[in-house]
Amino acid sequence: MREIGAEIAQDYAGREPLLVGSLKACIPFICDLSRATLIHHSLDFIELAGYGENDDGIRFLKDLDAEIESRDVVLVDAVIDTGLTMHYLTRSLAIRNPASLHIATLFERPYRRLVDDLPVRYVGFTIPDEFFVGYGFELEERYRSLPDLRLVR
C-alpha cells in the first residue's frame, strides 16, 4: 500500500487527484491507499452491476457525486481479472473529459485479461487464479470484514 500511495503522491505532486473506488470490495484497500497517499486528494465511489449479475450487462448502480472534467482520476479496485468491467468504467468516465484517468489495483490476474487497453498504472501484486475472502473480498456477501485474506478451497 505504501508503495502505491508513494507512487501516486509522486505522479500527482502539486495536483489533487480524485481516487474513485469501485464498491464494495475496494473499501479496505481504498482506505489504506488514501492514508498512504501523502498529498491532498479526494475520494468518491461508484458501484456497478457486473457481468453475470443481470441480463443487461454492466450498468451503474451508483454514479460519482463529483464532476471529473479536467480532474486527475485514479480508479481504485481490489482486483482486475478479465478487465471487462474496468474497460466499461474507463470508457464511461473518459467521455466526461478527465485530465487523466488511470487505474490502481491491489491485485491483478493478467493471464485472465480479455481487454488489453486498460490504463492500469499501479499494481500491488499479481496473484494466482485462486479465490480469496477477507479484506473486502466476499463469498455470498460474507467474510468481507475479515482483516486479512484467506484462501477458499
Image (spheres, helix red, strand yellow):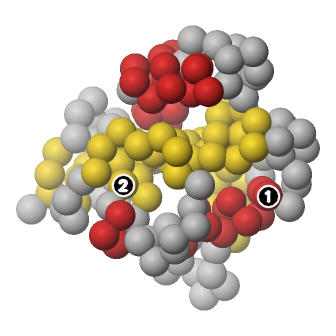
Crowd rating for badge 1 (residues with CA inside 10 Å; few <14, some 14–19, many 20+): some
Residue sitting at x 52%, y 51%: 120
Question: Quick check: 147 above or below 53?
Answer: above
Across and down, in percent, residue 127 comes to 24, 53
Crowd rating for badge 2 (residues with CA inside 10 Å; few <14, some 14–19, many 20+): many
The residue that disc 2 covers is 108
Q: Quadrant of the C terminus?
A: bottom left
Residue 63 at least partly seen: yes
Q: Is residue 52 left or right of residue 54?
A: left
Question: Which of 147/124 is in front?
Answer: 124
What kind of element bears circle 1?
Answer: helix
Residue sitting at x 64%, y 74%: 58
Furthest-left residue in view?
153
Upstream in sequence: badge 1 or badge 2: 1
Q: Is residue 36 left or right of residue 62?
A: left
Q: Hey, what amino acid is under mark 1?
A: Ala
The residue that disc 1 covers is 94
Give the quarter of the image for residue 59. bottom right
Residue 23 at least partly seen: no
